[in-house]
Amino acid sequence: MSEATMSRGFTSQMARNVFYGGSLFFVLLFAALILDTEQRIPERSKSAAITPAVVRGKHVWETRNCIGCHTLLGEGAYFAPELGNVYTRRGPDFIKAWIKAQPTGAPGRRQMPDFHLNDQQLDDLVEFLKWTNGVDTEKWPPNIEG
């Protein structure tokens, strides 16, 4: 390189090359991260374990607006407990008994409404909560009680 070329410093052509090279690098990096994530989703979400009962349970969850009070896997309202791991914490029989016993009428406590769920709806809702319990959340929620 001649002294005249070196004295010009950082040229617009060099800036363009850095911009295009950097852009290409980050686009390729972003594409690689997307592909890696897409390959991991079926295993982490346990999508193979989605049964008709899980789908019906999700329908019960949605039509009763459970997420309006509870959080599930960190999403939803914080009025009532996180339910992503309730299946492990309490078990299916407790979940069904708790829902059937609502509202308890205990003074000073927030009350869950009585949704008048039949046994099939309760079983389906428990299956949905069992499925969400199996989703790999990478240790979310950070505390076992939600």
Image (tube, rainbow, N blue to C red):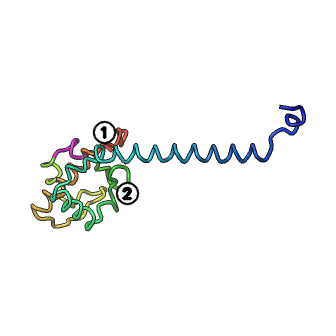
Q: Mark 2 points at which residue?
A: 76
**Labelled disc at residue 118:** none
**Quarter of the image where one finds residue 69:** bottom left
Q: In which quarter of the image is the N terminus?
A: top right
The stretch drawn in magenta includes residue 89: yes
Residue 105 percent location from the top left of the image = 22, 60
As displayed, is residue 1 above or below residue 66?
Answer: above
Q: Would residue 97 be found to the left or right of residue 74 on screen?
A: left
Q: Would residue 133 be found to the left or right of residue 6 on screen?
A: left
As displayed, is residue 24 above or below residue 9?
Answer: below
Q: Would residue 35 be found to the left or right of residue 131 on screen?
A: right
Crowdedness near tag 1: few (<14), some (14–19) or many (≥20) residues, C-alpha within 10 Å:
few
Q: Which of marks 1 and 2 is nearer the N terminus?
A: 2
Q: Quadrant of the C terminus?
A: top left
Residue 94 percent location from the top left of the image = 15, 48
The span from disc 1 to disc 2 (Cα, nearest Å) is 18 Å
Q: Which residue lies furthest to the front in this view?
A: 2
Foreground pick, 116 / 26: 26
- Residue drawn at x 20%, y 44% as measured from the top left: 90
The stretch drawn in magenta includes residue 119: no
Residue 103 percent location from the top left of the image = 21, 61
Amino acid carrying label 1: it is Ile
- Residue drawn at x 26%, y 68% as measured from the top left: 63
Part of the protein shown in magenta: 85-91
Amino acid carrying label 2: it is Gly
**Labelled disc at residue 144:** 1
Element under label 2? strand
